[in-house]
Image (cartoon, coloured by chain):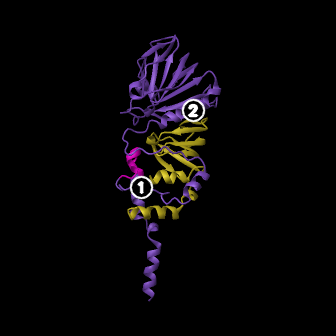
Chain colours: A yellow, B purple
Amino acid sequence: MLFFSYFKELVGREVTVELKNDLAIRGTLHSVDQYLNIKLENTRVVDQDKYPHMMSVRNCFIRGSVVRYVQLPPEGVDVELLHDATRREARGG
Amino acid sequence: MVAGLKEFTARVERNGVYEPVLDAENGEELMRVQPGVSIVLGNRPPESPGTLYISTKQVVWLSDVDRAKGYAVDFLSISLHAVSRDPEAYTSPCIYTQIETEDDEDESDGSDSESNGVLDLSKITEMRLVPSDPNQLDSLFEVFCECAELNPELIEEGEEEHNWIFSADQLEDEAIGDDSEWPVPQNLSNPIGQSNGDHDLARTVLELQINDQRFEDAEEMEHESDSDRH
């Protein structure tokens, strides 16, 4: 749940979602659900030479189970909030 | 296991119209019927005319002319779906999907799916659905999203309310007086892996907790330095 809660904070920001098949898509995080399904808007493929057919895609739905990494905007990482959350977790709630 | 694309021929006539036979006993329901849809498998030429059926479990395309011809793919196998409108990417606006196949690790460039002229559906990694009416694309996309959300990975424990967050306002509303904004999983060994099987992420959380000095308790450290001075 930590990641679901955390990704919710990033709605509206630019992220890069890297899939397990190596495709990486950059876009504005539109929404995320508990399964970490991710909807992106204003997307663009990072490696356009390798995936030219994905260039035109402007919005997409990515299944949570195929996501390898989500690259976060540095300014979207709230250290204080994470500090709090992890500390609570360490105390066992 | 992941099945990928498969043939689908089970159809039933209802009021003079053919429909795919669904697994109603297990709660499968038809969510959308879209006539006038061509299907494009991998780099093959489009097949048409046909009708698209979206159920709570799968996407089915049936040929309008050849009753023995049809394809289906479970939502569990659809990694990604999107609306594609740029004519440079594909000549017609379409729903673009990527399909997870058994041997995804092998480098396949689409040509693998065909050997000796025989099409191996289980190796198809891309499917495009081209409606004759492009105005249907957005609503089709939404139905795809809705149904994909109905099909999480099979290992599921403690179903929770489905809860999309769309705006910062919603977040603020939630945050007010809500101490559980950052819920704490009790089972630290696998905090989120159980919902999506992504152990890399789970491990990252553990490493953050255990190794990162930044997450040490600042208040306690201040107390310590205070007592040193006394």
Of residue B224 and residue B108, the one placed in the foreground of this image is: B224
Circle 2 packing at 10 Å, graded few (<14), some (14-19), many (20+), is some
Above or below, B36 against A73 in this view is: above
Query: Could you say where residue A16 lies in the image, as x and y percent from the top left?
Result: 54, 47
Q: Position of residue B182 (x, y in %)?
A: 48, 57
Residue labelled with disc 1: B204
Looking at the image, residue B139 sits to the left or right of residue A64; the answer is right
Q: Chain of mark 2?
A: B
* Amino acid type assigned to the residue bearing label 1 in the image: Thr
Quarter residue B96 falls in: top right
Question: Is residue B24 visible to the viewer in this orientation of the structure?
Answer: yes
Name the residue at 64% across, 26% down.
Answer: B134
> Can see residue B41?
no
Residue type at mark 2: give it.
Phe
* Span colored in magenta: B190-201
Q: Looking at the image, is mark 2 or mark 1 nearer the viewer? A: 2
B148, A21: nearer the viewer = B148
Residue, disc 2 = B141
Task: Name the residue rendered at 53%, 32% in the picture.
Answer: B144
For mark 2, give the secondary structure. Answer: helix
Q: Counting residues from the N terminus, which is met first, the one under dot 2 or under dot 1?
A: 2
State the quadrant of the N terminus of chain B.
Answer: top left
Q: Are marks 2 and 1 on the same chain?
A: yes
Q: Residue B58 appears at what percent x and percent y?
A: 46, 28
- Spatial CA distance of label 2 from label 1 is 33 Å
Verify CB contact (< 8 Å) between mark 2 and mark 1: no
Q: Secondary structure at mark 1?
A: helix
Where residue B32 appears, x then y in whole percent?
Answer: 54, 25
User: Pointer 1 indicates a residue of which chain?
Assistant: B
